[in-house]
Structures are given as C-alpha cells and as structure tokens.
Image (cartoon, rainbow, N blue to C red):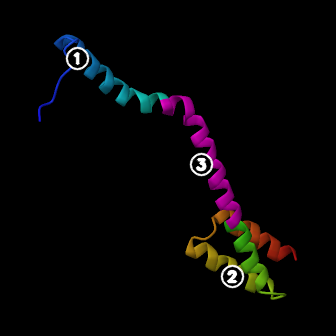
Amino acid sequence: MTCSASKDLGGLTKALWVLFIFVFMFIGPFVYLIVRGSGMGERALAAQADAQRQVQDYAQAVVAQSGGGSSADQIAKAKELLDSGAISPQEFETLKAKALNG
C-alpha cells in the first residue's frame, strides 16, 4: 500500500502547512494561559482559603472537644496541633487567646 501525497500542493506550501501546525501547537497553550490564567489563579487561591478554613474549624473543634477542661489543657491541645503542623503559629495564638479569655 502506498501513501499518496497531495499533488496539487508544492513542497514549499506543504512545508508551510507543517510549520503552521507546529507553531500553533506550541502557541495555543500559551494563548490559553494568557487568556484564562487569571481565573486559574483565582480558583487556586479560593481552594487554598477553603482548605485553611477547614483546618481552622478542625483545630477549634479539637480544642473545644477537650470539654470544659482548663485553659492549660486547651493550650496544650493547641500546642500539639501546632507541633504537628496542622495549624500555623498565628492560629495557635488565636486559640491560646480564646482559651485564656474563657
């Protein structure tokens, strides 16, 4: 079986078509990223903020789960979360302030 090439196009025209296909194959994704890139970043930031809220809710639930324990117990639980990396130092300070204030 033989491959039949288009006989109505010359070699230069075929080469230009091949170049056209390769150029758009590489430029297409860049154009997409330029046009739609900001939306991708916004969605990633929103997902990150949502994950952070979930971690904060979990940390507060764990500390609150210690019941009416003393402030020291609540701070100790918050410190465990901080040491495990589940919460940030700022979140630890917030939980500590809540435990100390009542």
The image shows residue 86 at horizontal and vertical percentages of 61, 71
Outermost residue toward the right?
102
At label 1, the amino acid type is Lys
Q: Quadrant of the C terminus?
A: bottom right
The image shows residue 78 at horizontal and vertical percentages of 69, 77
Task: Tell me the SS state at disc 2.
Answer: helix
Ranked by sequence position, the earlier of labels 3 and 2 is 3
User: In front: 21, or 68?
Assistant: 21
At label 3, the amino acid type is Ala
Confirm whether the magenta stretch covers residue 39: yes
**Residue, disc 3:** 44
Task: Tell me the SS state at disc 3.
Answer: helix
Magenta stretch: dominant secondary structure: helix
Say above or below: 85 vs 24. below
Q: CA distance from mark 3 to mark 2?
A: 30 Å
From the viewer's perspective, tell me whether residue 19 is left or right of residue 75. Answer: left
**Residue, disc 2:** 77
Confirm whether the magenta stretch covers residue 20: no
User: In front: 42, or 1?
Assistant: 1
Q: Nearer the viewer, mark 3 or mark 2?
A: 3
Q: Nearer the viewer, mark 1 or mark 3?
A: 1
At label 2, the amino acid type is Lys
The magenta segment: 32-54
